[in-house]
Image (spheres, rainbow, N blue to C red):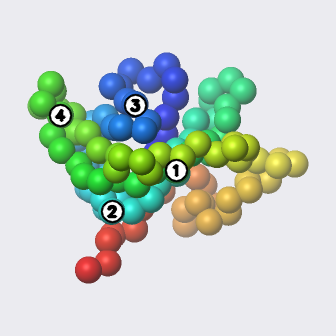
Amino acid sequence: MIHRSDSIYDDSPAERYQFPAQYRARVEACVDDWLVYYEPSKVRDTRGYFAVAKVEAVIRDPSSAEMFIALIEPGTYLDFVNPVPFNRDGRLIERGLLNAGQDIRSRAVCRPALV
């Protein structure tokens, strides 16, 4: 999940992640699964990938009809001791995040839960 300290959303990485309705299906696919937090590369001095957490549930945001909240399972948020940069020597570190066009944009963040 993308997180930045100056976000316009009501996020608290260890507790909740607020997002627009258009991403609901994508985030619901993450329920009961782990996700990786990262700061966008356009953030100056980005930390890259900096934490993990497990999504407990997705609920409608009671303060906004157009928004949803991913609730983070208590006790699962873990900051990395050493954040992982996106690139090293001009090459992406995590090649598994690339989409079919070899780009990191518009990729799925979680796989559907197995039942």
Which of labels 4 and 1 is toward the front?
A: 1
Q: Helix, strand or loop at disc 1?
A: strand
What residue does disc 3 label? 12
Callout 4 amino acid: Asp
Which of labels 4 and 3 is toward the front?
A: 3
Structural crowding at the residue carrying mark 3, measured as other residues with C-alpha within 10 Å and reported as few (<14), some (14–19) or many (≥20): few
Residue at the spot 55% in from the left edge and 66% down from the top edge: 100
Pick whichever of labels 1 and 3 is earlier in the sequence. 3
Pick whichever of labels 4 and 1 is earlier in the sequence. 1
Callout 3 amino acid: Ser
Pick whichever of labels 2 and 3 is earlier in the sequence. 3
Callout 2 amino acid: Asp
Residue lying at the far right in this picture: please name it: 89
Residue 14 spot, x, y in % from top left: 42, 38
Structural crowding at the residue carrying mark 1, measured as other residues with C-alpha within 10 Å and reported as few (<14), some (14–19) or many (≥20): some
Q: Helix, strand or loop at disc 3?
A: loop
Q: Spatial distance from mark 4 to mark 3, Cα to Cα?
A: 14 Å
Q: In the shown orientation, is residue 47 left or right of residue 25?
A: right
What residue does disc 1 label? 52
Q: Helix, strand or loop at disc 4?
A: loop
Residue 94 spot, x, y in % from top left: 68, 59
Q: Is residue 108 visible?
A: no
Q: Can residue 78 be seen in this view?
A: yes
| Residue 28, label in figure | none
Which of labels 2 and 4 is toward the front?
A: 2
Q: Spatial distance from mark 2 to mark 1, Cα to Cα?
A: 13 Å
Pick whichever of labels 4 and 3 is earlier in the sequence. 3
- Which picture quadrant has residue 40? top right
| Quarter occupied by the C terminus | bottom left
What residue does disc 2 label? 32
What residue does disc 4 label? 61
Q: Do the residues labelled 2 and 3 touch (CB within 8 Å)?
A: no
